[in-house]
Amino acid sequence: MPPIIRSTDDAAFRRLIGEAGGARAIVIDTESDSLYHYHQKICLIQVATEAGSSYLLDPLEGFPVEALRVLFENPDLTKVFHGADYDIALLKAKAGIAIRNVYDTMIAAKFLGRTEVGLQATLRDELGLTISKGNQKDDWSARPLSEEQMQYALTDVNHLLDVVAKQRSALEEKGRLHWVQEECAALEALSGLPAKADPREVFRDVKGVAALPPRGLAIFRELIACREHIADELDLPPFRVAVNEALLSLAHTEKDGGREAVACNLRRREYADRFHEALLRGLEVREADIPKLERGRRIELPLAQQRRVAALKEWRKGAATRVALEISLVIPQRLIDRIAEANPASLDALGNNDGLRRWRVEAFGEEILQVISRP
């Protein structure tokens, strides 16, 4: 088991920098604590190099994540991830690091037509390896880390360079390597994790909120805001204080059932008084101050545009079967809507649709133009 790196003065860190400095690629993964804390942190960073070495770097015990900027932002060094989007957003938000030159083995698996694209499935399909993901939901902020956790963390990076070699060969054979490279390049533009929303606005994004009556909506806003404040104080994820469904149930009743009725709907019952007070505040909100949800206005599309949408969706089914890809990968619904509205008449005009990517124009452009040009 490699030693845990806690400082840039560690000999292991200097060895990592030396190995990566002359390499073509490194593998990166992170572990965070979003299932256990309100303010999530980077708890562990795993790196594997072409030299066959693996490293564990521990920000919670002193390692400065910013020290990895020289590697992670180097455009000449490929950074291999499996499911890169969260790691990229986490590193950007917490350390201000913008990853450059990404290769995502999950994206590659999708373009190879794999029906399962998790790490377990990818290692099985490409290398015939069987791994356990039993520690996936561990509290990675707890210390010390067990040997089992460290082994699990290393498994996430130890084999991905071999996966890349297999995938690249298969993608080149299919003529899709540049498709994957273009999709991976787009990951560099991902934003960091969003800042926490105003506690009194969080209720708007909860599934099921649209079914609440007006007074219930006022109650739910207060209950959710209360939960956010408590979660912040305790540094716990909100669902560990009270789950959405329980608070929705309280809001639906539109009446005060008393403190005990509130307590029965909480995971942290010691905060029943505060939730009860929040419920009462919701009941006392003036009619004029009851919140309203912004509902999307239904727009009736021109008939010709509707026909283009329908034709593209029908074409997409056949194209997805022909190239053995998920239909959303061939072309997602948002791009169908955009193309149907723009109604491009040339490949150049088609390619001007934001997010379409060059590979789609190359692979399907002529077909798309034929489909939308039909009367």
Image: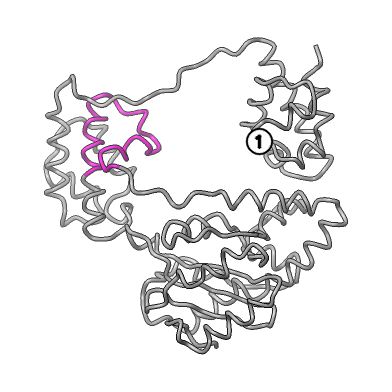
Compared across the picture, whether 278 is left or right of 30 comes to left
Residue placed at 27% from the left, 32% from the top?
A: 252
On screen, residue 49 versus residue 62, left or right, reads right
Please tell me whether residue 202 belongs to the stretch shown in magenta. yes
Which of the 4 image quarters holds residue 276?
A: top left
Q: Mark 1 points at which residue?
A: 332
Q: Does the segment drawn in magenta span residue 93?
A: no
Which residue type does callout 1 highlight?
Pro
Decide which of 116, 302 is in the foreground and name it.
Answer: 302
Secondary structure found at label 1: loop
Q: Please tell me how many numbered marks the rendered image carries.
A: 1
At 69% from the left edge and 36% from the top edge, which residue is drawn?
A: 356
Quarter of the picture holding the N terminus:
bottom right
The residue located at (83%, 59%) in the rendering is 170
Q: How far across and down, in percent of the image, does residue 206 sit? A: 37, 39
Q: Give the range drawn in magenta.
A: 198-225
Q: Viewer-proximal residue, 145 or 180?
A: 180
Where, quadrant-wise, is the C terminus in this rendering?
A: top right
Towards the viewer: 210 or 269: 210
Quick check: 139 above or below 312? below
Residue 84 left/right relative to 127: left
**Most common SS among magenta residues:** helix
Residue 249, x across and y down, in percent:
28, 38
Where is residue 11 drawn, in percent x and y?
51, 89
Q: Quadrant of residue 328?
A: top right
Q: Residues within 10 Å of mark 1 (few under 14, many from 20)?
A: some
Measured as percent of width and height from the top left, residue 305 is found at 67, 15
Above or below, 103 relative to 63: above
- Residue sitting at x 49%, y 16%: 298
Q: In this view, does 356 lie above or below 62?
A: above
- Quadrant of the rendered structure where residue 151 is? bottom right
